[in-house]
Each structure stands twice: as structure tokens, then as C-alpha cells.
Image (cartoon, grey):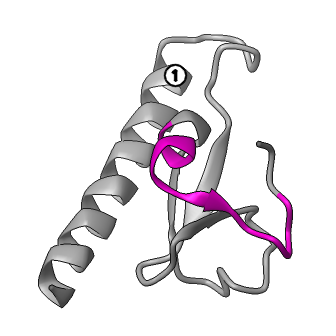
Amino acid sequence: MCLRRSLRFALAAVAGLAVGLGAYRAGRDAAEVPELVWITPTGRAYHREACRYVRGVGARVPLADARARYRRCRVCRPPP
């Protein structure tokens, strides 16, 4: 179970990075780049980067993907 969660977390981190780099390399403007939020390896919510629950661990994922799998953090209140 723990290994599966770690693998899912790692894949989400790679996917988030690939989306960000792909948009940068394509020369798109900021309006076309998907908004990124943070997820933690053990949590069930998505967060803003400055949230106290992220604390240096976490992976960036596109907001649309996070909405489908996680709930919003009640502390940092990321975009719905």
C-alpha cells in the first residue's frame, strides 16, 4: 500500500513537471499554462505552495487533475 502511494506520488510529480516544462518550451503565454497546486505523499487534499501542510515535501500537479482526485485544503484554500 505504501509503495503504491509513493509510486503514485512520484508519477504525479513527474507529470506536473512535464506539463510546466512543455508549456515553457512551446513559448505559450501565461494564460495557457495550467495552474499548478501541490499534493503531499500522504494527504487527501491539494494545497497552495505556501501551505503549512506542504512544508517542503510534495509534488506539483495541474489544478484540473487535483480537482478530480483530491479535496481542497481547508487551511490554505486553493482555487476550487
Residue 14: image x %, image y %?
32, 52
Q: Residue at x 80, y 54 (%)?
A: 78
Using the image as rendered, state which of residue 21 and residue 80 is in the foreground. 80
Q: Is residue 12 left or right of residue 67?
A: left
In the figure, 14 relative to 63: above or below? Answer: below
Residue depicted at x 25% and y 76% = 5
Who's the residue at 41% across and 79% down the image? 41
Q: Residues within 10 Å of mark 1 (few under 14, many from 20)?
A: some
Where, quadrant-wise, is the N terminus in this rendering?
Answer: bottom left
Q: How many marks?
A: 1
Q: Is residue 3 above or below residue 8?
A: below
Instruction: Say what amino acid the circle numbered 1 marks.
Output: Ala
Measuring from the top left, give residue 73's x and y in whole percent: 73, 68
Q: Is residue 66 above or below residue 55?
A: above
Tag 1 residue:
23
Q: Position of residue 12 (x, y in %)?
A: 35, 55
Q: Does residue 67 appear to the left or right of 2 in the view shown?
A: right
Check residue 22 for magenta coloring.
no
In this picture, which residue range is highlighted in magenta? 65-77
- Does residue 74 show up magenta in the picture? yes
- Residue ID at (53%, 48%): 66
Under tag 1, what secondary structure? Answer: helix
- Can you give x and y, in whole percent of width and height, for residue 48 in the image? 76, 62
Compared with 60, 58 (above or below) is: below
Q: Nearer the viewer, residue 33 or 70?
A: 70
Image quarter (top left, top right, bottom left or bottom right) of the C terminus? top right
* Nearest the eye: 32 or 27: 32
Q: In terms of image quadrants, where is residue 38?
A: bottom right
Left/right of residue 22 with respect to residue 72 in the rendered view? left
